[in-house]
Amino acid sequence: MKNIRVRFAPSPTGPLHIGNLRTALFNYLFAKKKKGSFIIRFEDTDKERYIKASEKHILNSLKWCGIQADEGPDNGNYGPYRQSKRKHIYKKYVKYLLKKNYAYYAFESKDELKQIRTEYKDKGKLFIYNYSTRKNLKNSFNNCYYNQIKKKQTKYIIRLNVPVSKTIKVYDLLRGNISINSNVIDDKVLVKSDGNVTYHLANVIDDHLMKITHVIKGEEWISSFPILHVLYYYFNWKMPKFIHLPLILNSFGKGKLSKRNYNKLNIPIFPLKWKDPIKLKTILGYRELGYFPDALLNMLALFGWNPGCEQEIFSLKELIATFSLKDINFSSARFDKQKIDWINHRHLQSRSIDELTRLVKLCLNEQKIYFNNDKTIKQIILRIRSQCTFVYQIIEKAIYFFKKPTLKKNYIKKQIINIKITKKILFLIIEWFNNYDKNNLKLLRLFLAKLAFKKNIKIHYFLKLLRLSLVGKLVGLEILFIITKLKTQDIIKRICNVILLLN
């Protein structure tokens, strides 16, 4: 089989959307499954929308997810891998198209075209710049305009000369044969007035020169498929195989998942956080919200791909081994926030205790909490990880092991039966901890039982007081386990804090 070569070609006009991340993932999985090459190429010729930070966000997002390029901006034999650096390459192909009359000059300004479209709309018609209208417009099909404007060195664009009354047939690996009459297609702009080539021409030239064998991209690009076919035909080049992936819809199943969904539905749409350079608003990504990168990829793979088995939890390595283009679904996938949370929960459960311990310590360090007792952390994780979806939840549920609780006076007072009696009990408990080994739980239980009998109060109340003192609320792990993991001096300090609160 011919060496498989696929590319992910984002435009650095904003952050990496998870829909585009899924496109990158499917390209990567296919390349790795077939032992081929995965290439990153930046389509950065849109000067008006270009954002410098976007390219870094895209590359960092892919790196965080473990999607590594075999070729790209930093290495490869088919560069440059930025279209802005390939202008010299495109020039000779533009000349070829003009010489063969496969392309032509057009001289209308944006305002003139806008006016023409408005006039057509007012008449209830749709304006298409093609064989039916171009002879009456300012372009090189009209010698009068061409010669007059050429002398004045007026700005121009270059358009594709779409053939007239031809049935254009294209084939998509997912959708099969697609046919369209050439008469309903625009003569697309190939070269803009600033000299930069557009998506259609640059893509065809780059994919051919970079020996791309398969083009895997989003469904939204299917409308440009016939245009690409015409260009391949004009150049007499063999087309790569195409597959257009179904959309990822919002959680309601209507409309494409977008930034608007994040604002309204609190659905994360970027792998990493993004600071909007205009609004200066930071939008958190999956990483900052606590998701594992392989859980995110696991979810995205299932949005549009069916592995043909009951397995739902995959590592990246397992995805590569299982992936097949034949198993991609035709219909769009609905985003399911509960599903990604469930997947992340399952990935957390499968992590080794050593890795979770390392991650917990990293999270603690970010909070300026430095806790180096790995044995205790591991014991805590084993007891509560089944309740957690994210690593930070382990810390939230066990924060009282790592720092003293914040006591709320009104809350504490509501839980006790009598301030005077309670303070006496707490002093007696402090005395016990000062004189005996806190890890001798049998002796502690005996002491509490005798104290309960003497005070005629159920032992549950004494355990409740200990929990309020050590945890700050009536939740948490078994109180006797907590006692064994805290230092005696910290236990005494926390009980003293409750006594001070009751004064």
Image (tube, rainbow, N blue to C red):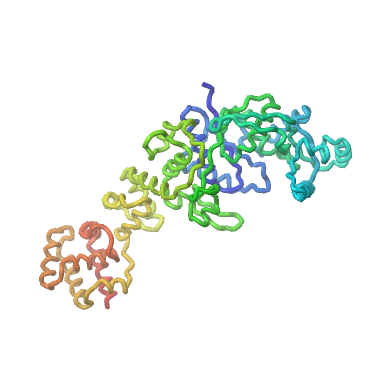
163, above or below 374, in the image? above
Q: Quadrant of residue 278?
A: bottom right
Residue 441 rendering spot, x and y as whole percentages? 15, 58
Q: Quadrant of residue 276?
A: bottom right
241 and 250: which one is in front? 250
Q: In screen coordinates, is 85 left or right of 446?
A: right
Residue 195 rendering spot, x and y as whole percentages? 74, 40
Total marks placed: 0
Furthest residue toward top:
1
Residue at image location 12% in from the left, 65% down from the top: 449
Residue at image location 56% in from the left, 39% down from the top: 218
Quadrant location, the C terminus: bottom left
239 and 404: which one is in front? 239
Q: In screen coordinates, is 101 left or right of 292?
A: right
Residue 167 rendering spot, x and y as whole percentages? 68, 29
Residue 292 rendering spot, x and y as whole percentages? 41, 46
69, above or below 426, in the image? above
Q: In screen coordinates, is 91 left or right of 314?
A: right
70 and 321: which one is in front? 321
Residue at image location 48% in from the left, 27% down from the top: 34
Q: Is residue 89 visible?
A: yes
Q: In screen coordinates, is 438 left or right of 275?
A: left
Q: Is residue 110 visible?
A: no
